[in-house]
Image (spheres, grey):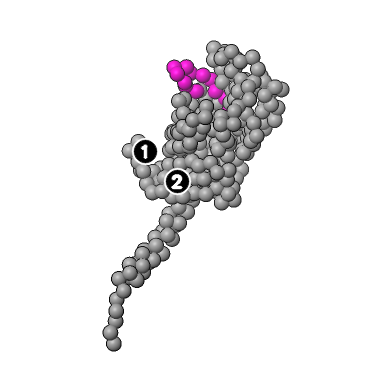
Amino acid sequence: MSFHLNPHRVIYCTLLIFLISCFPVSAQSLADIVEKHIAAMGGKDKLDSLKTIIMEGTFRLEGFELPLKGYLKNREAQRYNISLMKTPGYVIITQKAGWQYFPFQGMKEPLSLKEDELSTYLPYMDLQGAIYNFKEKENKIEYQGKEDIDDLPCHKLLITLKDGKQMTTYISAETFYITKTTMKIMVNGKEQVWESLFANYQKTNEGYVFPYALTLGPGKAFVNKIIINPPIDPIIFDPVSGKTSGF
């Protein structure tokens, strides 16, 4: 009996076997990365219980070192108080609107954030992070291999948020902490890449893990105190009634 070998079929079958063998590995690799990242950040129970944060530290920008205090309510609102020469100012962000008030820049009243300014903050309002429970949050993650960040090997993940925004997240292959995120934003009608770096991760007495050194665009933040799940008066997120709150 003669047998005719079809080269096209051989190529097709080889590719099929290759794809079948590779996809489960990729999926498993992503699942492992997500699982190890969650464990590194304190674990599922800790992330589930994270509702509010009050943090204190300093923000360095253009040669100035400004006192910084933040009030964060998971996926609802955030407020950052800063002072320059003992003159207080703030940024408030909610899911639907945001305001900034910097008297030291000549502002007489709080000004509403533009849509592109607000969109810069929104992805970071999730205190648990976009990776945790990403399927339930309707986020999508694509594994894009490894890439070195400051000579350290990192897993590169492309995260597409529920609202369509995309951020690239780099997770240390050693510690499974997030070391860097990049996101395209619009500034004055022009597209820019917003880069954030995260370092000096520490575990609190309660078992939560946070970065205590952050590079946020042109500025650097250094955290020296974090309070977990304190009560936060909603008035603090009101740009008028809470104008002088929290200083």
Where does the image place residue 159, in percent across and percent down from the top left? 49, 45
Q: Is residue 65 visible?
A: yes
Label 2 secondary element: strand
Say what amino acid the circle numbered 1 marks. Ile
The crowding category of the residue bearing disc 2, from other C-alpha atoms within 10 Å (few below 14, some 14 to 19, many at least 20), is many
Where does the image place residue 150, in percent across and percent down from the top left? 35, 36
Q: Check the picture and name the quadrant holding the N terminus.
A: bottom left
Where does the image place residue 247, in percent across and percent down from the top left? 62, 20
Residue wearing tag 1:
149
Camera-nearest label, 2 or 1: 2
Residue at horizontal 64 percent and vertical 14 percent from the top: 108
Position of residue 173 in the picture relative to residue 167 (left or right) = left
Q: Nearer the viewer, residue 213 or 114?
A: 114
- The mark nearer the N terminus, 2 or 1, is 1
Say what amino acid the circle numbered 2 marks. Leu
The answer to which quarter of the image holds residue 82 is: top right
Q: Nearer the viewer, residue 38 or 113?
A: 113
Residue at horizontal 49 percent and vertical 49 percent from the top: 141
Q: Give how far apart the Cα atoms at labels 2 and 1 are.
A: 13 Å
Residue wearing tag 2:
157
The crowding category of the residue bearing disc 1, from other C-alpha atoms within 10 Å (few below 14, some 14 to 19, many at least 20), is some
Residue at horizontal 71 percent and vertical 22 percent from the top: 241
Q: Taken as a whole, is the magenta stretch helix, strand or loop?
A: strand
- Span of residues in magenta: 59-71
